[in-house]
Amino acid sequence: MFRLPALSASVADARGRIRARLFEWGTDPEVLDDASLVVTDLFTNAIRHTDSEKITCVLQDWGAVLRLEVTDQGRGTGVPVPCTAAEDEEGGRGLLLVSVLSLAWGSDPADGGTGRVVWAELATHRAPY
């Protein structure tokens, strides 16, 4: 678990921390890459769509599943939902990507009544092609 300021520069820090921990755990490189993309999107969304000062990130190893949680301090625009982005738009595909890379994802109110936890669960091993 770690907390970082809700600043754009913190996204790379969060991604680096997740990658380092997963590397220490000996996580499959493809899963490590998937987790990096997921945390990048969830952390970025927490910064862009809430008025948080700090973002908390939790990584849990449940054996066959990795769980990533990103918690904001609230004051956001509501429950996160994937949207359809036009071909020429730079953003708007992040939660779609999260849904493709994850076994499951969702959001819950944060403990204490303020903020939201957005989570994603990834398989620790990819099925062979």
Image (spheres, rainbow, N blue to C red):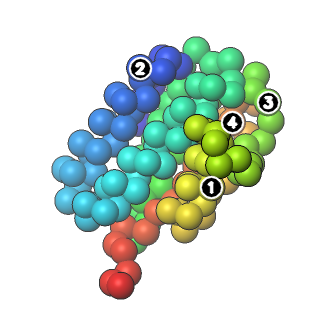
Disc 3 residue type?
Thr
Residue closest to the far bottom: 129
Q: Nearer the viewer, mark 3 or mark 1?
A: 1
Disc 4 residue type?
Arg
State if disc 1 and disc 3 touch (CB < 8 Å).
no
The mark found on residue 111 in the picture is none
Mark 2 → mark 4, Cα distance in angstroms: 21 Å
Would you place residue 69 above or below residue 1 in this image? below
State if disc 3 and disc 2 touch (CB < 8 Å).
no
Mark 4 → mark 3, Cα distance in angstroms: 11 Å
Residue sitting at x 59%, y 25%:
47
Is residue 46 among the parts visible in the rendering?
yes
Would you place residue 80 above or below residue 76 in this image? below
- In primary-sequence order, the first of circles 4 and 1 is 1
Local secondary structure at mark 2: helix
How many callouts does the rendering have?
Answer: 4
Would you place residue 31 above or below residue 94 in this image? below
How packed mark 2 is, by other alpha carbons closer than 10 Å (few <14, some 14-19, many 20 or more), is few
- In primary-sequence order, the first of circles 2 and 4 is 2
Q: Quadrant of residue 114?
A: top right
The mark found on residue 9 in the picture is 2
Q: Nearer the viewer, mark 4 or mark 3?
A: 3
Local secondary structure at mark 1: helix
Looking at the picture, tell me which residue is in the foreground, 111 or 66.
Answer: 66
Residue sitting at x 28%, y 51%:
22
Mark 3 → mark 1, Cα distance in angstroms: 18 Å
State if disc 1 and disc 2 touch (CB < 8 Å).
no
Location of mark 1 (residue): 96
Location of mark 3 (residue): 77
The mark found on residue 116 in the picture is 4
Q: Quadrant of residue 20?
A: top left
- In primary-sequence order, the first of circles 2 and 3 is 2
